[in-house]
Image: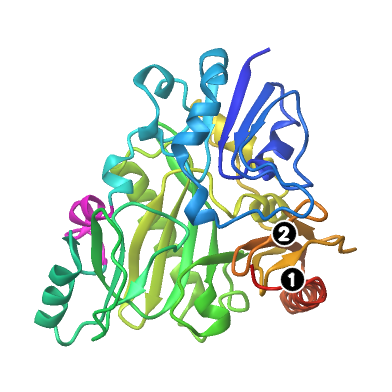
């Protein structure tokens, strides 16, 4: 039996799908929620324990640590599927050959290189590569009619993105950043499958950030709703069928341009000026379970088949599906919550710090309004439980 390694921040959802396939499964991850399947060949960095804090993810996570604990597995397995949190560029050439998915990602993950590759062909925000905060402000001041955001040159999940204003107290960590034109509008995403010779959009989705719910300046990823319809876009837009078609065409062109393989995603922002290409996610996306629930397919199987040259027949959506990540409203000690649509659950008694990911709501329904109401009701119940189990400030 061939051996398959899943490696990344959180492998729970992929493990559930992998265990239905004919492989010997290996897994290394940063998180291990209490609902993560337990398998023989499994290594986890964050060992959650009662009365102990899970810490601050941004301060503690390092992809090099996952590679380090994976050393034995990397040599032993036949195939490797990197998930969010680790890049194909992190692997040695020897192990990179085993990757099922897009391997050459340098012109994708470097946001400025990506901008230069697409700026003459696609509508995309004006962007500059900057190395210090003074340079960022100087460029910003030269474009008085444009508002800019500052984001890491490489990164995902919407972390460390800041609006540039006249305040020069903005934190600027070591490393390179990209200064990018801020495009107000509706965040969208396209999920596609690509083989060596073909590419096909699976489904389009409404991409959600904290800004959508709290109307603040946070661009951290919160979830998705799919498929993309007049209801799920949750905004007054022009012809939704035309928007879906534009996304499909652009995503499939980008797949060919960047030699994407397997399951990949493309993020967009839509406003009155058109559809802006923001970035490519050259890996299995956070929409993984939503796609499975909506289409009734095994996404990991579809990804592997695409990598091996076969793009499956894409069925029409049977349900709307909604994923919403709940970030902890306070510092709290997790207690059991009796709900059937919550996932990525902390271990009972472990401590989640304020603003860290607490759990994920995932649900489906053929009626969008009913689905939205269910997820919002679950949100309220989870937040109430978090307030009940609140701890004092550390």
- Seen in the picture, residue 371 relative to 289 is either above or below; the reply is below
- Seen in the picture, residue 263 relative to 114 is either above or below; the reply is above
Residue 392 figure quarter: bottom right
Q: Residue at x 64, y 45 (%)?
A: 31
Report the residue that reaches farthest toward the right: 338
Q: Report the magenta residues as a range.
A: 111-124
- Seen in the picture, residue 275 relative to 193 is either above or below; the reply is below
Q: In which quadrant will I find the N terminus?
A: top right
**Residue 225 drawn at (x, y percent):** 62, 67
Q: Residue at x 45, y 82 (%)?
A: 238
Query: Does residue 142 appear in this view?
Result: yes
Residue 160 figure quarter: bottom left
Could you say which disc has been placed on residue 391 in the image?
A: 1
Label 2 Cα crowd, 10 Å radius (few <14 / some 14-19 / many 20+): many
- Left or right of 112 on screen, residue 60: right
Label 1 Cα crowd, 10 Å radius (few <14 / some 14-19 / many 20+): some
Residue on which disc 2 sits = 351
Residue 229 figure quarter: bottom right
Q: Is residue 135 magenta?
A: no
């Amino acid at each position: 039996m061939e051996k398959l390694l899943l490696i990344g921040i959180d492998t729970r959802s992929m493990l559930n799908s992998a265990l239905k396939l004919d492989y010997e499964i290996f897994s290394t991850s940063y998180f291990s929620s209490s609902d993560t399947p337990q398998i023989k060949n499994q290594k986890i960095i964050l060992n959650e324990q009662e009365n102990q804090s899970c810490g601050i993810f941004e301060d503690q996570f390092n992809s090099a640590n996952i590679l380090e604990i994976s050393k034995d597995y990397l040599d032993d397995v036949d195939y490797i599927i990197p998930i969010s949190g680790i890049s194909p560029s992190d692997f040695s050439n020897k192990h990179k050959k085993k990757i099922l998915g897009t391997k050459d990602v340098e012109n994708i993950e470097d946001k400025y290189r990506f901008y230069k590759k697409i700026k003459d062909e696609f509508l995309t925000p004006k962007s500059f590569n900057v190395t210090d905060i003074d340079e960022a402000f100087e460029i910003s001041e030269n474009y008085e009619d444009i508002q800019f955001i500052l984001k890491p040159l490489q990164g995902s999940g919407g972390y460390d993105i800041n609006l540039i204003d006249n305040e020069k107290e903005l934190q600027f960590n070591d490393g390179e950043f990209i200064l990018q034109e801020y495009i107000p509008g509706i965040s969208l995403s396209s999920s596609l499958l690509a083989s060596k010779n073909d590419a096909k959009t699976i489904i389009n989705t409404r991409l959600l950030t904290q800004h959508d719910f709290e109307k603040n300046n946070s661009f951290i990823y919160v979830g998705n709703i799919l498929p993309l319809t007049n209801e799920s876009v949750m905004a007054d837009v022009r012809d939704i069928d035309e928007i879906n078609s534009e996304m499909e065409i652009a995503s499939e062109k980008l797949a060919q341009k960047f030699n994407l393989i397997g399951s990949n995603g493309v993020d967009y922002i839509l406003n009155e000026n058109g559809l802006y290409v923001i970035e490519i996610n050259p890996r299995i996306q956070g929409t993984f379970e939503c796609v499975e629930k909506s289409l009734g397919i095994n996404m990991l199987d579809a990804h592997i088949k695409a990598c091996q040259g076969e793009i499956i027949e894409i069925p029409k959506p049977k349900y709307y599906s909604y994923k919403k990540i709940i970030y902890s409203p306070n510092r709290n000690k997790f207690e059991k919550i009796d709900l059937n649509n919550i996932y990525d659950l902390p271990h009972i008694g472990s401590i989640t710090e304020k603003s860290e990911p607490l759990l994920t709501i995932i649900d489906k329904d053929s009626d969008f309004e009913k689905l939205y109401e269910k997820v919002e009701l679950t949100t309220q119940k989870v937040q109430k439980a978090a307030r009940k189990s609140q701890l004092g400030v550390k």
